[in-house]
């Protein structure tokens, strides 16, 4: 999982200066709102970390490109847009924190 992603690929203006948490969700996902809140809580405690929510309901091209099998799927991108980890389904807060800490190491 080393393919660099450009912000425009996901209709974003820019990535976070340290990391970006990308949540792929769908309109009917019952677990997505809770995951979105969790990601924002984690990002709010770290400078330079942003959250991007991408609804793939009307973007099947993204679902194929990222081989989405679960909703939500969360990617942790470094500042350059390179995926460093992936969670298929809702992640645990400690797991997201750990992945962000690995970027700081």
Image (tube, rainbow, N blue to C red):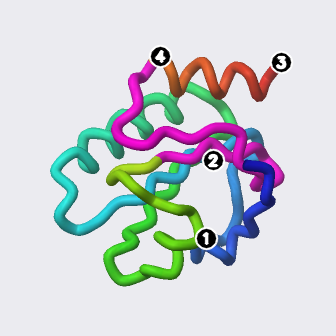
Of the numbered discs 3 and 4, the one sitting upstream in the chain is 4
- Circle 2 crowding by C-alpha within 10 Å: few under 14, some 14–19, many from 20: many
- Circle 3 crowding by C-alpha within 10 Å: few under 14, some 14–19, many from 20: few
- Circle 4 crowding by C-alpha within 10 Å: few under 14, some 14–19, many from 20: few
Give the camera-side residue of 101 and 90.
90
Residue 20's tag is 2
**Residue 104 figure quarter:** top right
Left or right for 74, reference 70: right
Q: Nearer the viewer, mark 4 or mark 1?
A: 4
Residue 12's tag is 1
* Mark 3 to mark 4 CA distance (whole Å): 16 Å
Give the camera-side residue of 87 and 23.
87
The residue at which mark 4 appears reads as: 94
At x 57%, y 47%, the residue is 75
Give SS at disc 1: loop
Give SS at disc 3: loop
* Mark 3 to mark 1 CA distance (whole Å): 26 Å
Of the numbered discs 4 and 1, the one sitting upstream in the chain is 1
Of the numbered discs 4 and 2, the one sitting upstream in the chain is 2
* Mark 4 to mark 2 CA distance (whole Å): 16 Å
Give SS at disc 4: helix
| Count of residue discs | 4
Q: Are marks 4 and 1 in contact (CB under 8 Å)?
A: no
* Mark 4 to mark 1 CA distance (whole Å): 26 Å
The residue at which mark 3 appears reads as: 105
Of the numbered discs 2 and 1, the one sitting upstream in the chain is 1
Write the start and end of the magenta stretch as one range.
74-93
Of the numbered discs 2 and 3, the one sitting upstream in the chain is 2
Reply yes or no: does residue 84 show up in magenta.
yes
| 103 versus 6 height, above or below | above
Q: Are marks 2 and 1 in contact (CB under 8 Å)?
A: yes
Percent coordinates x, y for residue 81 in the rendering: 76, 55
């Amino acid at each position: 999982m080393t393919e660099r992603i450009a912000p425009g690929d996901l209709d974003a203006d820019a990535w976070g200066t340290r990391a970006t948490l990308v949540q792929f969700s769908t309109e009917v996902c019952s677990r997505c709102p809770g995951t979105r809140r969790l990601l924002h809580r984690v990002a709010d405690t770290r400078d330079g970390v942003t959250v991007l929510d991408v609804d793939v309901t009307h973007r099947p091209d993204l679902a194929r490109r990222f081989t989405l099998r679960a909703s939500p799927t969360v990617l942790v991108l470094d500042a350059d847009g390179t995926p460093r980890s992936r969670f298929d389904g809702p992640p645990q807060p400690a797991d997201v924190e750990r992945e962000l800490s690995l970027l700081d190491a």
